[in-house]
Amino acid sequence: MKTLEFRCDGLKEVVALCKANSIKVYAFQRNEPIGQVIVVSENGQIGSVSESWGGLSYSTVHKGNRQCGTGFGLSGVFGCEPALIERIKDAMFTIKPDWAQNYTVEKYRDWNDYISKPINQILTYFEL
């Protein structure tokens, strides 16, 4: 089996933290170093963690809409955070940050709801 490569050590740490906490992790980069993962809680809440400037950037994931896209960045414009289970949980469980309270968003019910949408079928995900 091919050894997985990551764009930063932080993403490898995120995968280890998730596995230790019964959180599923998905990626889509099969033939290049992994730069983003989708994290899914046991109850189906979804978040995203990406490589950013050598560190990590955490984001929420929700059903896309014209008003506010498909998720909110939780790490600022140039997010560069370490791998922390608390931040992984923030990405999965946050519906919208305080500054976005005027927006209406709908979270996906679970992973199956997420991958059932045509926009999320553009990439082919695999579980890590």
Image: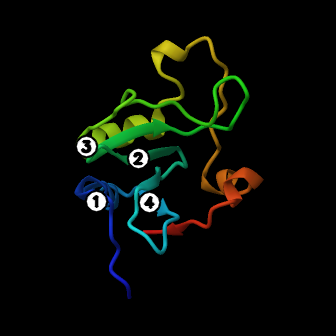
79, above or below 25, in the image? above
- Categorize mark 4 by other alpha carbons within 10 Å: few (<14), some (14-19), many (20+): many
Asked if marks 2 and 4 touch (Cβ < 8 Å), the reply is: no
**Which quarter of the figure has residue 52?**
top left
Compute the Cα span from label 1 to label 2: 17 Å
The residue labelled by disc 3 is: 84
Please state the horizontal and vertical placement of residue 27, each as a whole percent of the image: 48, 62
Q: Secondary structure at mark 1?
A: helix
Residue annotated with mark 1: 20
Label 3 crowd (10 A; few <14 / some 14-19 / many >=20): some
- Foreground tag (1 vs 2): 2
Q: Quadrant of the C terminus?
A: bottom left
Where does label 4 land, which residue? Answer: 25
- The 10 Å Cα crowd at callout 1, few under 14, some 14 to 19, many 20 or more, is few
Q: Is residue 8 left or right of residue 35?
A: left
Q: Which residue is mark 2?
A: 49
